[in-house]
Image (cartoon, rainbow, N blue to C red):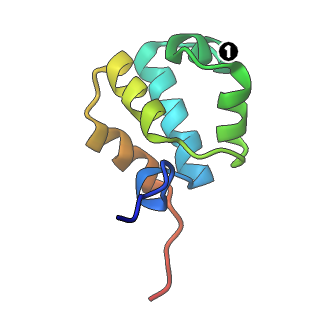
């Protein structure tokens, strides 16, 4: 039986522009002033937010669920926000 890694591409959001937009949308929804306040609200270390913003860490499933819990936004809606800034892929 083949096991899927925890952070397979289908389970993470690793679009830098989209992830920044997602973090910004969560900040607006929660009326937060900066990334430090966002890290406290999401209960993650500040470097996690910084790494996501700079494209060194994707938004994983557990963080996406946490965003859903604190904002009451649907996970589908959170994913859509991140995908809006996704670069076009040539066919």
Residue drawn at x 66%, y 44% as measured from the top left: 57
Residue drawn at x 71%, y 38% as measured from the top left: 51
Depth check, front residue: 45 or 15: 45
Residue 60 point in image, percent of width and height = 50, 41
Q: Left or right: where does residue 66 sit relative to residue 57?
A: left
Question: Which quarter of the rendered picture does the N terminus lie within?
Answer: bottom left
Image quadrant where residue 74 sits: top left
Residue 16 point in image, percent of width and height = 62, 51
The residue most toward the front is 1
- Image height of 75 relative to 89, above or below: above
Residue drawn at x 69%, y 49% as measured from the top left: 55
Depth check, front residue: 3 or 66: 3
Depth check, front residue: 60 or 36: 60
Question: Which quarter of the rendered picture does the C terminus lie within?
Answer: bottom left
The residue most toward the bottom is 91
Task: Assess disc 1: are there few (<14), some (14-19) or many (≥20) residues with their C-alpha within 10 Å of its C-alpha.
Answer: some
Residue 73 point in image, percent of width and height = 29, 28
Helix or strand or loop: what does disc 1 sit on? helix
Residue drawn at x 74%, y 26% as measured from the top left: 47
Please name the residue that numbered disc 1 is placed on. 36
Count of numbered circles in the view: 1
- Image height of 1 relative to 55, above or below: below
Depth check, front residue: 85 or 9: 9
Residue 78 point in image, percent of width and height = 36, 39
- Image height of 14 relative to 42, above or below: below
């Amino acid at each position: 039986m083949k096991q899927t890694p925890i952070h397979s591409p289908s389970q993470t959001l690793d679009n830098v522009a989209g992830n920044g937009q997602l973090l910004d949308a969560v900040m607006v929804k929660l009326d937060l002033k900066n990334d430090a306040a966002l890290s406290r609200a999401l209960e993650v270390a500040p470097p996690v937010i910084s790494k996501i913003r700079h494209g060194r860490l994707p938004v994983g499933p557990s963080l996406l669920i946490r965003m859903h819990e604190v904002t009451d936004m649907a996970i589908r809606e959170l994913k859509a926000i991140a995908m809006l800034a996704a670069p076009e892929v040539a066919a």
